[in-house]
C-alpha cells in the first residue's frame, strides 16, 4: 500500500527541518498541523542548540570567561553589583522562556545569539541575551534593568534588531541603524545633509530625508518652479 509523504516522514523520526516542513502538509481534516511546529522547536533545541552550546559550571564562571575572552563588554557589567547581575540572570532563566515557533528559534540562534568567534558554538540563550540588553540599556539602574528584562521575556517589548543584536557585546556594531535627517531650504543645510548621509551610511544604517520637495514644484508662492529637489 502506498504511503503519503507525511507518513514516510513520521516513520523516519524526522528532524526539525522535516517537522517544520510538515506545516505545508494538511492533515486528513484539511487542517494545518501546528503541533509539528512545536515539535520542530523541541527537536531543534534538543538536537542542535543544546548539543552546540558551551557549558559552564556557574553563571559567575560564564560571565568571567566571556569578559576575559572579549565577548562581553566589561564596562556594562561593572556598572552593577555582581550579586545583582547574577540575580538578574537567575530571574531571567526562571521565566523558562520557550520559542513559540521554529522560525523564531531558528532566527534567534542563527542571527542574534552570541557565538564563539569561529561561529560554531553558542554562548547565549534568549534569557542571557535579554539580560545583557537590559543591563546595557539601564546603564546602572537596577530597577530599570529588571523592568526591561521582564518586558522582553514576557513578550510585551522587543528591542529593535541592532539593539538586541549588539547590546552588551565587546565586539559589536551600532545600537541603532535608522537615521532621520532634517534638511532646511538652503544650500548649507543640503550640504551638511549629504555629508551626514554619507557618514551614516558607512555604519550600515538607513537614512531618511523626509523634507525633500519635488522638482518643478512652485517655489513658495512664486510662479517660478524649482529646478532641483530643493529648488
Image: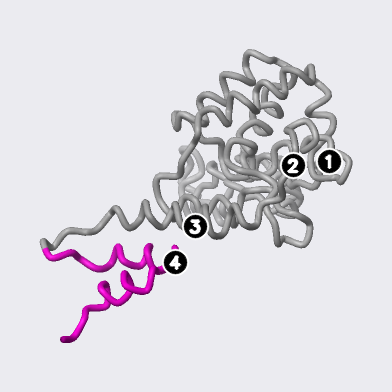
| Helix, strand or loop at mark 3 | helix
- Residue 14: x and y, percent? 40, 69
Q: Would you name the residue on which mark 1 appears?
A: 65
Q: Are marks 2 and 3 in contact (CB under 8 Å)?
A: no
Q: Would you name the residue on which mark 3 appears?
A: 44
Is 132 in front, or is 172?
A: 132
At 50% from the left and 25% from the top, the residue drawn is: 151
Q: Would you name the residue on which mark 2 appears?
A: 56
Q: Are marks 4 and 2 in contact (CB under 8 Å)?
A: no
Q: CA distance from mark 4 to mark 2?
A: 27 Å
- Residue 87: x and y, percent? 67, 21
Residue that sits furthest to the bottom in the current view: 1
The label on residue 144 is none
Q: Would you name the residue on which mark 4 appears?
A: 15
Q: CA distance from mark 4 to mark 3?
A: 8 Å
Q: CA distance from mark 1 to mark 2?
A: 9 Å
Asked if residue 183 shows in the view, the reply is no
The 10 Å Cα crowd at callout 3, few under 14, some 14 to 19, many 20 or more, is many
Q: Nearer the viewer, mark 2 or mark 3?
A: 2
The 10 Å Cα crowd at callout 2, few under 14, some 14 to 19, many 20 or more, is few
| Helix, strand or loop at mark 4 | loop
Q: Which residues are magenta?
A: 1-28
Q: Are marks 1 and 2 in contact (CB under 8 Å)?
A: yes
Of label 4 and label 1, which has the lower sequence position? 4
| Helix, strand or loop at mark 1 | helix
Left or right: residue 99 versus residue 19 is right
Of label 4 and label 2, which has the lower sequence position? 4
Of label 1 and label 2, which has the lower sequence position? 2
Position of residue 169 relative to residue 229, above or below, is above
Amino acid at each position: 500500500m502506498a504511503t503519503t509523504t507525511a507518513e514516510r516522514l513520521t516513520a523516519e523520526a524526522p528532524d526539525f527541518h522535516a517537522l517544520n516542513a510538515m506545516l505545508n502538509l494538511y492533515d486528513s481534516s484539511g487542517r494545518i498541523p501546528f503541533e509539528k511546529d512545536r515539535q520542530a522547536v523541541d527537536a531543534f533545541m534538543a538536537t542542535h542548540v543544546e548539543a552546540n552550546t558551551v557549558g559552564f559550571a556557574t553563571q559567575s564562571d560564564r560571565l568571567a570567561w566571556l569578559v576575559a575572552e572579549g565577548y562581553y563588554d566589561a564596562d556594562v557589567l561593572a556598572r552593577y553589583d555582581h550579586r545583582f547581575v547574577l540575580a538578574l540572570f537567575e530571574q531571567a532563566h526562571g521565566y523558562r522562556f520557550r520559542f513559540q515557533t521554529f522560525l523564531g528559534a531558528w532566527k534567534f540562534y542563527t542571527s542574534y545569539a552570541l557565538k564563539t568567534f569561529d561561529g560554531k558554538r553558542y554562548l547565549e540563550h534568549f534569557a542571557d541575551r535579554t539580560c545583557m540588553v537590559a543591563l546595557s540599556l539601564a546603564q546602572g539602574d537596577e530597577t530599570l534593568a529588571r523592568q526591561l528584562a521582564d518586558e522582553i521575556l514576557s513578550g510585551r517589548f522587543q528591542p529593535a534588531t541592532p539593539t538586541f543584536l549588539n547590546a552588551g557585546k565587546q565586539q559589536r556594531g551600532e545600537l541603532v541603524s535608522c537615521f532621520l535627517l532634517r534638511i532646511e531650504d538652503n544650500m548649507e543645510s543640503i550640504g551638511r545633509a549629504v555629508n551626514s548621509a554619507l557618514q551614516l551610511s558607512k555604519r550600515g544604517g538607513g537614512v531618511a530625508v523626509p523634507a525633500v520637495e519635488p522638482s518643478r514644484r512652485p517655489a513658495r508662492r512664486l510662479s517660478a518652479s524649482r529646478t532641483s529637489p530643493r529648488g
